[in-house]
Image (tube, grey):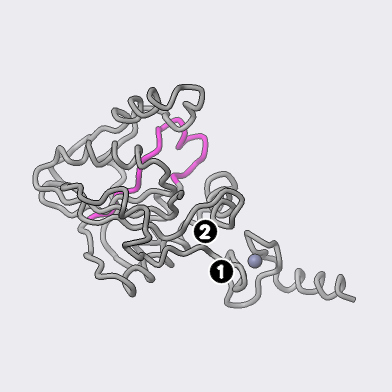
Amino acid sequence: MKRILTELLYLFFPNTCVNCKSPLIIGEEQLCIACLNQLSYTRFNVNQNPAELLFAGRNEISAAYAFLHYEKGGITQKLIFSLKYHNNKKLGFLLGRMAALQLIRQVDFEQPDVIIPVPLHKKRLKKRGYNQSEWIAKGFNSVCRKSIDTTSLVRLKKTETQTKKSVYDRITGIETAFQLTSGENLEGKHVLLIDDVMTSGATLNACVKELSRCEKIKISIFCLAVAQ
Ligand SMILES: [Zn+2]
């Protein structure tokens, strides 16, 4: 009986939850309500937000926010996997939008002038077909309604897969991985840099270092998930 009911549900609601695979009902998108409630939200609590702690005291950083905690084997990891490797751009949009709505409600969020998603190397972009951080940015921007800049900062190195190199080599590799193509349009602007997952912060640091070459720039950081 239960199986027949489940099959009927699939017939009427063919979309399934990214995490538990149960059929999604009207009003649910990507995740069922139960899984949505189980997500490990940071709630943008400054004292418990590793993103804020990692960049605290840095002059060039105005604020740093992370929406979810990233734990191995947890729901967040599944979401990131679906977003990056299963062509689930919509999930990036949805989570970016959810994050922006929560951020505006919960903290004194200063609106940026422009949003820059952390760029992918052009070869990786061609292979994946999209930049997952750009889809997070699109969702975020559906609330902010600013502009998204995908051309001023480019990635010169495919640092993501240098797993065989030592940590030192990877860090020195990433330090010079990004380049400004034109900085003038960012002068005096407040930029919100958006990334998918932050682990050591090395990628975002490298972007910040390059963006800081612009005169009077102010930089804030948002990442969808932060590893502990
Ligand atoms: Zn679910």
Label 1, secondary structure: give it.
Answer: helix
Question: Where does the magenta region start and end?
Answer: 114-131
| Residue closest to the eye, 160 or 122 | 160
**What type is the residue that disc 1 sits on?**
Leu
- At x 58%, y 64%, the residue is 30
Does the residue at mark 2 contact the one at mark 1 (Cβ under 8 Å)?
no
Q: Which residue is mark 1?
A: 36
Residue furthest front in the image: 47
Q: CA distance from mark 2 to mark 1?
A: 13 Å
The reply to whether the magenta stretch includes residue 125 is: yes
Q: Please, is residue 2 above or below residue 168 in the view?
A: below
- Mark 2 burial class by Cα count in 10 Å: few <14, some 14-19, many 20+: many
- At x 20%, y 55%, the residue is 62
Count of all numbered marks drawn on residues in the image: 2
Q: Which mark is residue 91?
A: 2
2 vs 1, front mark: 1
**Quadrant location, the N terminus:** bottom right
Horizontal placement of 205 versus 218: left or right? Answer: right
- At x 50%, y 27%, the residue is 163
**What type is the residue that disc 2 sits on?**
Leu
Quarter, ligand 1: bottom right
Ligand 1 within 8 A of label 1's CB? yes
Q: Please, is residue 220 above or below residue 164 in the view?
A: below
- At x 29%, y 36%, the residue is 206
Label 2, secondary structure: give it.
Answer: helix
Horizontal placement of 8 versus 57: left or right? Answer: right
| Residue closest to the eye, 160 or 186 | 160
| Residue closest to the eye, 48 or 148 | 48
Q: Position of residue 24 (x, y in %)?
A: 66, 70
- Mark 1 burial class by Cα count in 10 Å: few <14, some 14-19, many 20+: some
